[in-house]
Image (cartoon, helix red, strand yellow):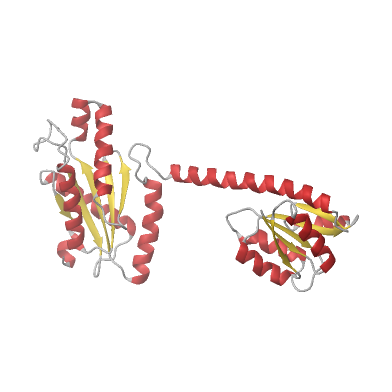
Amino acid sequence: MRVLVVDDDPGSRLVAQAAVERPGHECLVADDGDSAWEMFQRYEPHVVVTDLVMPGMDGLELCRAIRAHGQEAYTYLMVLTSFNAREDVLAGLEAGADDYVAKPLDPFVLHSRLLVAQRVTSLHAQLARYRAVLSEQARTDPLTGLPNRLKLTEDLDTLHERAERYGQDYALAMCDVDRFKEYNDTYGHQAGDRVLQEVAAALAGGSRRGDGVYRFGGEEFLLVLPNQSWAGAKAATERARASIEALAIAHSGSPAGVVTVSAGASAYTQGHRPDLDTMLAEADRALYAAKAAGRNTVALSEDADRTGR
């Protein structure tokens, strides 16, 4: 572990440093709260052992600052107090400390407390990894492995806000597998699931770096195309459509004889700056226009004609 010892008394610092380094921990030392705070932000120690009374930022202020810092990893805090100073112990715990050690410092006591600190910080690290995995799972469609609607909402909010602020363009394309219900009825739902997986892989594999492909729901997918105009959106979506047709997955219910997709695109460009809900609605209407035009085709939102392509 990396341990930061903070004490303005040189003797106490030396005793603490020896107790920390003897079992093999890395030890950082500071002689006041201000320098300790700078070192904490730079080195992110696993444990901080701090005296309470110090020049500048005192131990209580240091504990509060560390707890308010919001770093990912958990830092175990120990305060050094005078023997039987119950008020100091309570004040330290209320400020965010996990434990206390009485002065004069006993190396054995500090060593034993560090064992506890190591166990606690390891458990926090495991919990952080589990939370990260659960967060990723909550944002991933289990069938296709694509990001799901939750992740889409987060990413679109960020993209739209950036486009608004900096006047950037972007486009959305809603893709829908043609006659998918008929495919399921003819070939079975397991085959239908495999089709969705293959379509998802083809869409993701054909996208540019920086583009996004999301499972929107059912047999629908959404392409998010940053820095694209109407013409760019049309070209990118046409490539996606062609890549699905090129899979050549047999579909007796399709006029093409293979699985195809229809797609509708909308763009956030100069002269056309709708809100995000409107963008999605425009892409959806364009998708229905593509379906009405015979499927296996790409349609642009009607706003493309009004604003220029």
State the residue lying farthest toward the left.
Answer: 255
- Determine whether, in the image, residue 231 is placed left or right of residue 56: left
For residue 114, above or below residue 199: below
Quick one: 240 or 309, which is closer to the camera?
240
Q: Is any atom of residue 301 visible in this view?
A: no
Residue 285 in percent (x, y) is at: 21, 50
Quarter the C terminus occupies: bottom left
Instruction: Tell me what residue is drawn at x 70 percent, y 67 percent.
Output: 36
> In this orientation, does residue 24 appear?
yes
> Within the image, what quadrant is residue 210 found in?
bottom left
Is 260 rendered above or below residue 90? above
- Asked where in the image residue 66 lies, by quadrant, the reply is bottom right
Residue drawn at x 65%, y 64% as measured from the top left: 40
Front residue of 281 and 93: 93
* Residue 117 locus on image (x, y percent): 71, 49
57, above or below 49, in the image: below
Position of residue 272 measured from the top left corner of the image (x, y, whole percent): 25, 66
Q: Residue at x 80, y 63 (%)?
A: 14
Q: Residue at 17% of width from left, 57% of height from top?
A: 234
Instruction: Residue 211: give x, y in percent of width and height.
Output: 30, 56
Quadrant assignment, res 185? top left
